[in-house]
Amino acid sequence: AGEGGGLLVNQWPHILDLWQWVCGMPTRLQATCRFGGHHNIEVEDEVHVFAEYENGATVFLTGSTGEAPGSERIEIVGSQGRIIADGDQLQLLRLKVPAPDFIATAQPGFPSPSSTVETETLDPNGDYAAGITRDFVAAIQNGTGGPLIAPGTEGAAGAMLANAILLSAWSDRAWIPLPLDLLSEERFEHLLAGRIRTSVQSAATSSAVFTLEDSFRRPG
């Protein structure tokens, strides 16, 4: 009732958005959350998610606000190799022989497919949030008519993932089909309302003034 939300809506909105933007929405997921596991709060501060796609692909997502030093790392593994995004480094490990072909023809023993490595350093000062904001303002002021870089439907998809994760955690790690149907949405709203009613808000003991710059700092 007082805090409104934890890791999913404070630290992870961009992570959830990036997940569904790059990989699309999964067909179902299950999750576990720790509520106040590291801090004196009522909301989630540690989340672990396992998701499945119609084509058989799987995703594992894990995050915590109780670990230090922090890290942000994304790995995408396919039949042709692996992409790793870690900080401002983007690494592509490209297999010389696709994994399914290598597995089918590998000789007994401990063979390992060979690969090449390509590395690129990303611009940490790229035109990210500012560019999206300018695009949004231009669409309002000038009626550009073109598709927005980040339309509202993208935000709705990320919010649905967050709600599904909480619904699974509140339902003993049950599988939650996606997209959420009306029954699932109503159950989420019911469980959320119950937790708001039983919330025990602690009185503020201190106050501080700060800027948001520190919220964008990168590890190291």
Image (cartoon, rainbow, N blue to C red):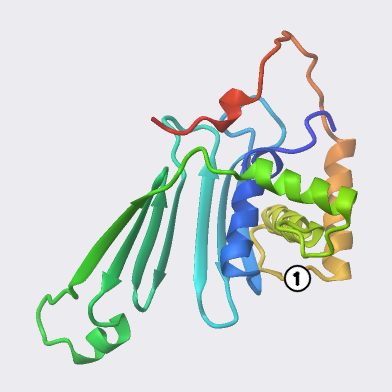
Residue 177's quadrant in the figure? bottom right
- Which quadrant, please, contains the N terminus? top right
**Is 168 left or right of 122, judged from the image as shown?**
right
> Residue 4 appears in which quarter of the rendering?
top right
User: Residue placed farthest to the bottom in the image?
Assistant: 105
Q: Horizontal placement of 84 versus 167: left or right?
A: left
**Location of residue 133 with respect to 52 vertically, above or below:** above
Residue 11 shown left or right of residue 64 in the figure:
right
Q: Position of residue 47 (x, y in %)?
A: 58, 47
Task: State the image quarter where residue 92 is shown.
Answer: bottom left
Considering only vertical position in the picture, is 166 above or below 27? above
Residue found at x 82% / y 27%: 200
Total number of numbered labels? 1
Between 10 and 28, the one lying in front of the other is: 10
Residue nearer the viewer, 47 or 99: 99
Q: Position of residue 39 (x, y in %)?
A: 61, 27
Quadrant of the image for the C terminus? top left
What residue type is disc 1 on? Pro
Q: Secondary structure at mark 1?
A: loop
| Residue drawn at point x = 48 percent, y = 39 percent | 124
Q: Residues within 10 Å of mark 1 (few under 14, many from 20)?
A: some
- Percent x, y for residue 42? 72, 33
- Tell me the residue that label 1 is attached to: 179
In the displayed orientation, state which residue is furthest to the left: 109
Relative to residue 86, is residue 152 depicted above or below? Answer: below
Query: Viewer-proximal residue, 16 or 65?
Result: 16
Judge from the rendering whether residue 80 lies leftward or rightward of residue 70; answer left or right: left
In front of the other: 96 or 67? 96
